[in-house]
Every structure is written in C-alpha cells, then in structure tokens.
Image (tube, grey):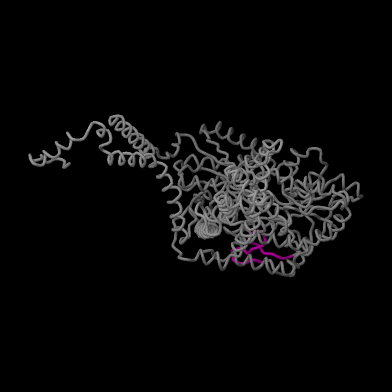
C-alpha cells in the first residue's frame, strides 16, 4: 500500500516536472530564412488579385532564383501583422494601407527606404507625388505605393436608355435631375446609391470648392487642421444628404445592400460612386450587367479622392538584401506593369501605362486628393462624420449643426490622445 | 518519535511497550496524519498545472491589465507612464465610452429579466408531462448549441431592410412596413436584444429544468391541499425552492450580458452600429485596442468594466442570495 502510493506520487511528480520542462524548453523559434528565400505577406483578396500575385511571385522566382514564402493573412490584417512583429515572425515585405501606415511608421516597424532615391534603375521620381505623399513620414520614405484608384460614376446603361437619358450627368444639377428621373420607389429602385461615408462625401466637398490640399481633401498638408466647416461644406452636405432626403437616392443599407457596388449590381440603383475595384466585382458577381463609367459630376471645380495601397519592408528583417531585391522588383517598373495589367488596377508610376478600360479613372488622378490620415483619426473623426451624414440624410439633424459637429470631432481627433 | 537520535534505554522502553500494546488492527491506520498529508500533497500536485495556467493567463493577465492602464502603449513601442490620463480620457474627453456603458446597461436591464422569465416559463412547460416534451426540449435548447457568429450572420439576412422579417411583417393584414432593423439607430440595439434572448434562453431553460426536477412532489401536493395552486404555487413555493438556480441564471446572465461582443460586432460590421447605437463596452475596448492601438485606454476601460461587473454580481448576490437563505 505504502509502496504503491509512493509510486503514484512519484508518477504525478514526474508528469508535473516533465510537462514544466517541455513548456520551458519549447520557445517560439523564428523561422530561419533559408539562404535565397524571402517572405511576402498580403491581405486576402479576390481571385483576380490572387492571379496577379501568383504571376508576380512566379516571375520573380524565375528571374532571381530566390524562393518567395507567400503568406496570405485573412481577417484583421493590421492586427495580425502587429502580432507577428512582436512575435518575431514578421514577413520581410508586406502590403500596407494608408489607414495604419503612420501607426507602423511611428513605431519603427518599417524600414527607411530613402536610399531608393539614389538607385537610378528604380526610378523613384516616376511615382505620382500626390499618391506617394501618404507614405512619407517625418520626411522619410517608409512605403512605396503600388496601386491606387479614384472614384467614378458608374451608371446602368439599360436603365438610362429606358428613362430616355442620353448621357451620364456632368454637373450636380444634372445629377439631381437624372437621379430623380430614374427613381421608382414602388419598384424599390432609386437613382443613385450614396453611402454615409466621408470617403465619398469628401469628393463633393472638394468639388464645392472647400477642403484643403492635405489628407483626403479634409486636412491641410501638415495634417494639423481640418477644413470642413465652410460655405462650400454646407453646400456639399446639403446636396449630398439632400438627394437622400428627397428620396432620389438611397443608402446601401436602405436597399438591403452592404455597399454601393452591391446595390448597383443588384439594380436597386441606377448609379453608384465607387472606385476601380468595382470592375472585377461586377465581372464576377453580376456579369450580365450592362454598365458604363463616367467622370464624377463637377460643381465649382472637379474633385476626387485617391485610395492607395503600398509595399513596406520590415525594419528588423534578417533578410535585408533579398527583401530589398523583392521590393525593387515588385514596386519597380516591371512588377507594377505585371500587377496592373493582370489585375486591372491603376499603376502608381508614370512610366507604366494604365491598363485598358481604366481611362476614366486614370484621367481623374490629377483632381484626386490622397486619402490618408494620422493614426486614430479614422475612428475618432471619420466614424462620427459618417454618423452625422447619416443623421442629416434621415432628417434627424440639420446640415449646419451636423457640419459644426463634424468640424469639432475632426479638430478633437487631431489633438493628441493620452 | 524523534528522528535521528538514538533513544536512551528509558525512552525506548515506553515506545516498545506502546508498539507491543497496540494490536495488529491499528497498524494500517497508524500514520493517519501522514495519510492525510499525503492526500493533501497529491491534491496540490494534481491542481498544480491548472492553477499555474490560471495564475499566468487569468489572474496574471488581470494584474497586467491594471498595471498597463496607467501607461500609454501601442504594442510596437515601450509603455510610457501617463498616470490617470487614460481614465480621464474615458470619463471626460471621449463621449463614446459613456454611450457604450449606457448601451450595455440598457441591454442588460432588458435582456436579463426577459430571458430569466422566458427560460423559467419554458422550463415549467417542459417539466409537465405533455406529449412531445422531448421535442419541445430539443427545439428550445437548439439555438444555444449553434455558434453565435454563424447565427449573427444569418440574422444579418433576416434583419436586412429587404430581408425575411420585414417580408413577414409586410404580409400581415394592413401591409405595414417594418423598420430598418440594422440601419436605424432606434432599432439596432433592440435587434441584438431579440437575437440574444432567442439564443441563450435554451441554456437557461435547461438549468431551471434541472432545478425544477429537484422540487419534491410532496411539497407541491401539500401546498395544493392548503389551497395554493397555479401561479401562487409557482411564485410562493417553487421559486424560493429553486433559489440557487435562480441566482445562477441571473448572475451568469448579467455577467454575460455586460460582456456582449460577438453579436454587436457582426451586426454592426465592427463599427458600433448606426450612430453608436450598438456600441457596447467590450466592442469599445476591442476598437480601442486593436483598431486604434490605444492599449492603455483599452486596459483602463477593461478595468472599469471589471469593477462594474463585480459590483453588479455582489448586488445580485445580496438580492437573490446563493446557497444560504435570506
């Protein structure tokens, strides 16, 4: 009895010590990069983008012989990326978005790319300045813009013909007239889908002559002040929300859609304002739709927004030379050409011709303000601005008080957080 | 017995006499203290690993949370001490936290009573000897078994402005049109309330059912003889008898409701709903931590939420009581 109880105790103690030993011995080992390999991380995307990525990876591997460890991060991309930075398993080269670029750059996770200005073969001066500006932090380059899209007016050609409208609207007045003409509330069809999103409304703010030259047209170049409250802002808000109030336009959720593109594809609306990404979406999901693209309507002047994505390199990568080689290929002339022609996105370099069918989007580049903001601004200012736009659309708030609130929230968000 | 020292003759004699005097029957039980001690050691050894895990990941994480709430930290840099600035930000500068607390409180005050009453009623029904009671039991319990994320996604379609629910409403006589359940700030939180009540009532019903089956028939029969039947029997006799189960349901329901996140996140697509109407406390913490990288602020909000839940549980314990009667 005593012997067996002693053995039992010994067994338990042994299990405990063994498991503690195993736990202490297993450490997270950073994947050792085999000589001649480099890791590239991207967010999850549609089949068209995946085809483009595959082409880029294959051609790089064939040309240089370095293998690429291609990682797709599903889910919350910036959060997963941050977790990998702290765990030591960070990819060498990865996609970044202007939303969290400043967050990463200010914390030292991105490699300083200033040296590329001196690499003649790379051609850094070929980047559109107004697009690349979003990836410069503290006067240093931390990202290379890879593609961009502007906004355009997509219109349903069948519905236009049926309503007898010969050409898409060119001014605000024409837009309002056409939208109201195309609305048929009994059939749950509206003229245009307008989301309560500053990432669409800001274009109207610029067109009305308001805004400034910095982030998204809302901020000044130094990103210290917001320029929302103005006569132009009031006019833009009254027009934009007014279309919904009149019943000639609808928000996507009012027609049961998740975004403007879905409402447009399901033919609940005759027009939508979206970027170049709608092309591949409609080709895959609504291939039989008869639609066309037109420049955004103009008011006092033309105005547009540019949404970009970029490449970044991890600052503390153990694979520096391969990472830079990969970056120079992806963001250089050949990589950008492959990418934009396979996927149909606009190239951010002047020496690459825009692919076929994107002329309308490409022509708007000169009027477009790059959509980028300081960290935290999206949640502290852009979300309340969207709420206010919706409140005006629903008639719950007057345009002038909404404008005041938007200006206040933007100013508060530009001040420092604790 | 003294260990190590050689007993002198006079001391050894009593020990030997003692050993000779005790019969064989007590030889097995002699080291009773040692047996108890061995048992205690075994117990601690078995608990050691789960306890270590709890200390590190639950308790230790909580202590870390309290500590980091006094710092500014964006996870890629090192924490910077800011004192009570995070708490000041939550209470005085950011109005969204107060909105989140208000929404959470409103949500709890509606959902907890409703789901308790409905679960109790369903348990009473299923406890009767009616035909098909196992079918009803399965049907009522079924929603709790499914994943809350999957259910939220399906309800995204049901609550859609042109979705199933509004279609059914429009089929009613008079053809009323249903509201925009998810897009209207006045209805978004109510949609989540309805969704959650439907999901969790099943689990709570099972708890009540188990407690009801412990209520002895004789008590109810004696009460019936004294003239207490129906609602009186239920409220005056059955409810006090199932007090422990009631406490469990209300306390757990309250704790769970104050931490609601999944449904709010999915039905508002991570934004906190039309005009912050579905912003709950945990969703706010999530956004501050993972979207804005303000880990200090998120930790401060977590600490405050912990305090609120703790106090609420103590209040429930006072009102309803646990094992002890009032």
- Residue extending farthest to the left is B9
Q: Quadrant of residue B216?
A: top right
- Residue extending farthest to the front is B225
Q: In the shown orientation, is residue A33 left or right of residue B211?
A: left
Q: In the shown orientation, is residue B28 left or right of residue A262?
A: left
Q: In the shown orientation, is residue B152 left or right of residue A39?
A: right
Q: In the shown orientation, is residue B199 left or right of residue A395?
A: left
| Residue B266 can be seen, yes or no | no
Q: Position of residue A344 (x, y in %)?
A: 70, 41
**Residue A348 counted in the magenta span:** no
Magenta segment, principal secondary structure? Answer: loop
Q: Nearer the viewer, residue A413 or A206?
A: A413
Quarter of the picture holding the N terminus of chain A: top left
| Residue A287 can be seen, yes or no | yes
Q: Nearer the viewer, residue B172 or B41?
A: B41
Q: Position of residue B274 (x, y in %)?
A: 69, 57
Q: Is residue B14 above or below residue A113?
A: above
**Residue A213 counted in the magenta span:** yes
Residue at image coords 16%, 41%? B3
- Tag count in the figure? 0
Q: Position of residue A401 (x, y in %)?
A: 72, 69
Q: Is residue A7 above or below residue A377?
A: above
Q: Quadrant of residue A198?
A: bottom right
Residue numbers of the magenta segment: A209-227
Q: Position of residue B143 (x, y in %)?
A: 66, 42
Q: Quadrant of residue A23?
A: top left
Residue at image coords 22%, 33%? B23
């Amino acid at each position: 009895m005593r012997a067996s109880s002693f053995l039992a105790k010994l067994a338990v103690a042994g299990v405990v010590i063994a498991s503690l030993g195993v736990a202490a011995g297993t450490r997270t080992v950073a994947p050792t990069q085999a000589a001649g390999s480099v890791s590239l991380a991207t967010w999850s995307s549609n089949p068209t983008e995946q085809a483009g990525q595959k082409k880029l990876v294959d051609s790089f591997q064939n040309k240089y012989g370095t293998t690429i460890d291609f990682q797709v991060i599903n889910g919350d991309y910036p959060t997963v990326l941050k977790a990998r930075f702290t765990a030591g398993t960070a990819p060498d080269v990865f996609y970044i978005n202007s939303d969290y670029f400043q967050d990463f750059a200010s914390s030292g996770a991105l490699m300083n790319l200033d040296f590329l200005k001196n690499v003649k073969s790379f051609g850094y001066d070929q980047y559109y300045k107004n697009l690349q500006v979003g990836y410069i932090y503290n006067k240093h380059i931390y990202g290379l813009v890879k593609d961009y899209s502007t906004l355009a007016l997509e219109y349903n050609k069948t519905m236009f013909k049926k309503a007898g409208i010969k050409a898409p609207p060119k001014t605000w007045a024409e837009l309002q007239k056409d939208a109201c003409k195309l609305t048929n509330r009994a059939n749950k069809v509206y003229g245009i889908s307008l989301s309560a999103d500053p990432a669409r409304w800001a274009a109207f703010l610029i067109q009305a002559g308001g805004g400034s030259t910095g982030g998204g047209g809302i901020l000044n170049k130094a990103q210290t002040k917001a320029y929302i409250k103005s006569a132009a802002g009031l006019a833009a808000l009254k027009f934009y929300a007014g279309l919904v109030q009149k019943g000639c336009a609808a928000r996507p959720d009012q027609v049961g859609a998740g975004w403007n593109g879905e409402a447009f594809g399901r033919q609940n609306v005759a027009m939508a304002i979206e970027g170049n990404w709608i092309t591949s979406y409609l080709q895959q999901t609504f291939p039989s739709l008869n639609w066309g693209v037109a420049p955004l309507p103009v008011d006092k002047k033309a105005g547009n927004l540019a949404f970009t994505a970029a490449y970044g390199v991890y600052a503390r990568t153990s694979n520096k030379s391969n990472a830079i080689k990969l970056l120079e290929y992806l963001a250089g002339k050949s990589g950008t050409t492959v990418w934009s022609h396979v996927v149909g996105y606009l190239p951010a370099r002047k020496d690459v011709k825009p692919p076929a069918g994107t002329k309308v989007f490409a022509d708007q580049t000169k009027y477009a303000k790059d959509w980028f903001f300081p960290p935290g601004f999206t949640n502290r200012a852009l979300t309340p601005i969207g709420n206010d736009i919706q409140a005006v659309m629903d008639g719950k708030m007057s345009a002038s008080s909404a404008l005041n609130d938007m200006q206040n929230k933007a100013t508060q968000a530009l001040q420092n957080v604790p | 017995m003294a260990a190590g020292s050689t007993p002198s003759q006079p001391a050894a004699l009593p020990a030997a006499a003692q050993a000779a005097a005790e019969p064989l029957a007590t030889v097995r039980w002699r080291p009773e203290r040692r047996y108890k001690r061995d048992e205690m050691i075994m117990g601690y050894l078995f608990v050691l690993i789960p306890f270590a895990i709890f200390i590190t990941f639950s308790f230790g994480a909580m202590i870390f949370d309290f500590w980091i709430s006094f710092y500014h930290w964006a996870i890629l840099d090192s924490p910077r001490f800011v004192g009570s600035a995070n708490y000041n930000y939550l209470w005085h500068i950011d109005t969204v936290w107060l909105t989140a607390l208000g929404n959470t409180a409103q949500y709890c005050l509606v959902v907890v009573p409703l789901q308790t009453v409905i679960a109790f009623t369903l348990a009473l029904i299923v406890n009767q000897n009616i035909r098909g009671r196992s079918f009803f039991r399965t049907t009522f319990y079924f929603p709790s078994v499914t994943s809350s994320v999957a259910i939220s996604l399906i309800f995204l379609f049901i609550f859609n402005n042109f979705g199933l629910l509004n279609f059914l409403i429009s089929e009613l006589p008079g053809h009323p049109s249903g509201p925009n359940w998810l897009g209207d700030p006045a209805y978004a939180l109510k949609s989540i309330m309805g969704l959650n009540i439907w999901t969790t009532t099943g689990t709570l019903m099972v708890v009540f059912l188990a407690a009801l089956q412990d209520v002895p028939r004789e008590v109810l029969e004696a009460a019936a003889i004294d003239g207490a039947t129906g609602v009186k029997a239920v409220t005056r006799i059955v409810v006090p008898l199932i007090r422990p189960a009631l406490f469990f349901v209300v306390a757990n329901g309250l704790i769970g409701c104050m931490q609601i996140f999944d449904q709010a996140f999915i039905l508002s697509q991570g934004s906190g709903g039309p005009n912050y109407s579905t912003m709950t406390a945990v969703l706010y913490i999530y956004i501050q931590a993972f979207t804005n990288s303000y880990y200090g602020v998120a930790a401060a909000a977590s600490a405050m939420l912990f305090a609120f839940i703790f106090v609420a549980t103590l209040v429930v314990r006072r009102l309803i009581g646990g094992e002890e009667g009032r």
